[in-house]
Image (cartoon, rainbow, N blue to C red):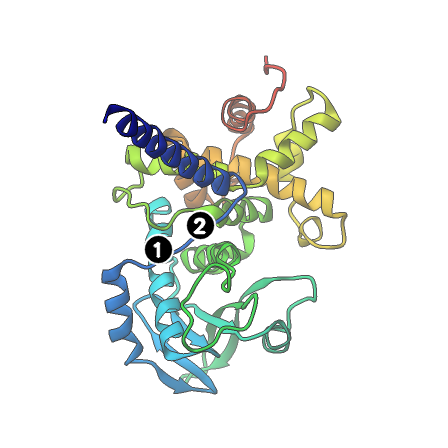
Amino acid sequence: MRLPTKFALWFLLFLLLSRTAQAEDKVKKGVLEWKWTKKERKAIKVLAEKVTEKDGYRYLENPNWHIKTELSAQFTAEAATYMELFYDSFCQVFYFKTGLDLDVKPTFYILRSRERYLEVSKAPEWTGGLYRFGYNTFKNEKGEIEKKYYLNLYVYLNKFVSDDQDFACEFTPLNVIQHEGTHCLLAHLLGDKYFKFPVWLNEGMATYYEYWDLRVKASDEGNSDRDIRARKKRLERSPTPIELKKYFEKHGDTPPKLSYLSSLNTQKEWSEELSRETIHLHYALAESFADLMICSRGRREMLKTMFDRLCKDEPLLTAEELDDLEKEWHKRLRKRWDVDIRKTK
């Protein structure tokens, strides 16, 4: 009787290890999965009954977004629920207020196809998602010029989704939603000052959020140990470490200069006008710096200071701060991103 028992125990251990290895493999490949809990599914069914028709879309308004989709009421309710979770997660990291927050909610469009996406958003052909932020001017009753802001986020489905299919990562570009959604919420946070927000830092923050786990709950200031552990786990989902290794294989032990990263301040350095290899490197460097500013408890306070200075039209960083940040960035590259560069003196 003991032999079958031992065999069963070994077999169970083998299954457990196999599943763990599979799970780790998925994380390393950058798989961003999403499944609703039973409680969420019940809430979504109730929310779906509130979906209406507006301007040819299924429409739903929640506390922080306008949701417009070309899909079913069920899918629209799921999108609304997901975007509220994303908003809450964003606020856990960007917990501070600027006093410039817009009084307009972003509008999130999910289109059925790429063709519809290009038609509605007027986006460049090479894009997979797009956000638009701006304003129109008009005269009020007193003859004064006022601004009416708009903040729109556009994505399309990777494949057709029928009305009986759930909101799922194999159909919905979650990474794109979280990247472009971060741009939207940063614009909402900064208002007009967003137009002066450095492009390289903007893209770094958005790329950082691509593989963020929205299930993670943090303290009000985003400082809990569990929050920090989740950020470390996010690195395993991101392709950035691979891009950084390519950089060091090409450049030897020469570390990147922060002055180079901060010079990437026009849209040209982030568009298809450059080679794909160069663009991927720019995003990787920007994300690695965003990782430093968000994951380090002390640096999150510096990030808040940078936002405060931006709102006051002051330089974001002094020369001394830039020098200190570069040294810390290089140190973090060695420790967190598993790359071998010489120590900064």
Quadrant of residue 74 within the rendered picture: bottom left
Residue 327 x/y as whole percent: 55, 22
In this picture, residue 235 sits left or right of residue 8: right
Q: CA distance from mark 2 to mark 1?
A: 9 Å
Q: Nearer the viewer, residue 294 or 85?
A: 85
Residue 337 x/y as whole percent: 54, 29
Instruction: Say if residue 302 shows up in the picture.
Output: no
In this picture, residue 146 sits left or right of residue 341: left
Q: Label 1: how many residues lie within 10 Å, few (<14), some (14-19) or many (20+)? A: few
Marks 2/1 in contact by CB < 8 Å: the verdict is yes
Instruction: Say if residue 293 shows up in the picture.
Output: yes
Q: Nearer the viewer, residue 193 or 144?
A: 193
For the N terminus, the image quarter is: top left
Q: Label 2: how many residues lie within 10 Å, few (<14), some (14-19) or many (20+)? A: many
Residue 252 x/y as whole percent: 72, 21
For the C terminus, the image quarter is: top right
In this picture, residue 93 sits left or right of residue 252: left
Sequence order check: which comes first, mark 2 or mark 1? 1
Q: Amino acid at mark 2?
A: Cys
What residue sits right under mark 1 in the picture?
A: 99
Circle 1 sits in a helix, a strand or a loop, which is it? Answer: loop
Q: Is residue 331 above or below residue 202?
A: above
Q: Residue at x 55, y 22 (%)?
A: 334
Circle 2 sits in a helix, a strand or a loop, which is it? Answer: helix
Q: Nearer the viewer, residue 95 or 5?
A: 5
Q: Nearer the viewer, residue 217 or 331?
A: 217
In this picture, residue 294 sits left or right of residue 216: right
Q: Which mark is residue 311?
A: 2
Q: Residue at x 28, y 36 (%)?
A: 224
